Image: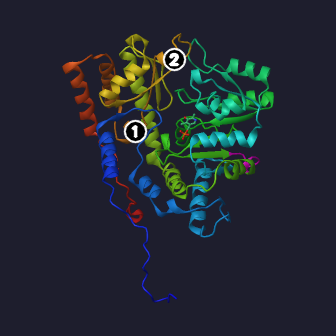
Amino acid sequence: MATLTEESTTAGLADAPDPDLDVLVATEEDRRARQVNLLAGENDASPRVLALLGSVFADKYAEGYPERRHHTGCGPADSVESLAVARAEALFGAQHANVQPYSGSIAVLAAAAALLRPGDAVLAMSLAHGGHLTHGSSANFSGKWFSVSGYGVSERDGLIDLDQVRDQARALRPKVIVAGAISYPRAIDWEAFRSVADEVGAYLVADAAQTLGLSAAGVIPSPVPYADIVCGVTHKVLGGPRGGLILSTRELAERVDRAVFPFIQGGPMVNQMAAKAYTLGRAATPAFAQYAQQTVRNAQRLAAALDGHGLRPLTGGTDTHLVTVDARSLGLTGREVERRCEEAGLLLGHCAVPYEEAPPAAASGLRMGTLSVTTRGMGEPEMSGIAGLVHAAATGATGPARESVTEGVRALAERFPGLSTKPQCGDSASG
Ligand SMILES: *Cc1c(COP(=O)(O)O)cnc(C)c1O
């Protein structure tokens, strides 16, 4: 029989060296340091966000909601989630917040689960005009489980055609109208969508994953006063952990909560909720408002400068961090421009240009964002420089011309190294 004082002879679980992964992490840090990132949805998480993601909360199971958990030992986890919820509700002026969704797509799935039954009619932005996968793609739950019709932008100015939205809503009588997009650079008129939804008796879901952070800073109008459910993420503009967020009216609170857990998810990621809580607190500071304003100014300068190189901004400009341009003047597909830019160390994306004839694989739009570059401290002068680098990378064929573009990108990245990639929980008392 073992006694309480006997020395343990069992093997605990400890760390072993793993040079393979050490190398991969170092390689990724190096990539991030060398490249200039214009990917629309990416931002650079701060050392504190990384530290909270790597904190002991990563281990904790906490199925359920604060004070109503399936597991024991949830005291600190309850406090983390309650803090994140309180900060989200205060930041956005929302009646209810759920901070458990693992990602933005899961938040949209939960909104659908809260409001719809399989087969119900939904009206959402068509994918060819900027809608997200979860807005009716035939490969996604949205297209498979619901009857989704798409509205689009007007051919004349590239802006959302609200007359078309109204006509389609009257004809379809959808149960849910989804407003929001991944590559629409303009502020969305949530109030107009609300009036269409009211007219046909539909719920309004705002998928504001791209822009909710800008609304938090007051840079563009917020969907919260108008939508029944708002879906968002804490990465993108907010610069926090990859993860989703749902805001709703008080009436829908319980349906939203039950849709997230137990309908879709099991235990929430408590470490992710801790990093969300930090991010939502930071978003209420003047420094964040300044960041959001600079992000939009940078996007506006980038759009104007690309226009100067013959890359026409879709909709004529931007109100957000997003810049979409028509690259047909280059005589290259968006994917080819994307590839040439990556070779030079510039990351950007391709997208469809609404109403273009080309098949999706040959789409000739480019999609960019100014989140990471603004986090790294770049301003308008650098945006003008980046536009020149994008144009040169796309057009400069080979040899010294190409090398000088790569050099230019590298020099810019080195001049603005950005935040440390080492997780760190700073000393709150000192600042
Ligand atoms: C980014 C985004 C999403 C998806 O978020 P994930 O975290 O990648 O799942 C959903 N909808 C819109 C409009 C987005 O921009």
Magenta-highlighted residues: 248-253
Q: Which amino acid does the dot numbered 2 rest on?
A: Val
**Outermost residue toward the front?**
1
Q: Which residue is mark 2?
A: 353
Taking the spot 63% from the left edge, 45% from the top edge, the residue there is 246
The answer to whether 200 appears left or right of 76 in the picture is right
Q: Which is more toward the observer, 44 or 4?
A: 4
x, y percent for residue 151:
66, 21
The answer to whether 24 appears left or right of 136 in the picture is left
Q: Main secondary structure of the magenta part?
A: loop
x, y percent for residue 46:
40, 50
Taking the spot 61% from the left edge, 64% from the top edge, the residue there is 78
Can the viewer see residue 13? yes
x, y percent for residue 97:
64, 50
Q: Which is more toward the observer, 47 or 190?
A: 47
Q: Secondary structure at mark 2?
A: loop
Q: Which residue is mark 1?
A: 372
Taking the spot 61% from the left edge, 43% from the top edge, the residue there is 106
Using the image, determine if residue 98 lies above or below residue 178. Answer: below
Label 1, label 2: how far apart the Cα atoms are? 24 Å
Of tags 1 and 2, which is closer to the observer? 2
Q: Is residue 391 magenta?
A: no
The answer to whether 290 appears left or right of 255 in the picture is left
Name which of mark 1 and mark 2 comes first in the sequence: 2
Name the mark on residue 16.
none
Taking the spot 46% from the left edge, 89% from the top edge, the residue there is 5
| Quadrant location of the C terminus in the rendered image | bottom left
Q: Which is more toward the observer, 81 or 112?
A: 112
Q: Is residue 251 magenta?
A: yes
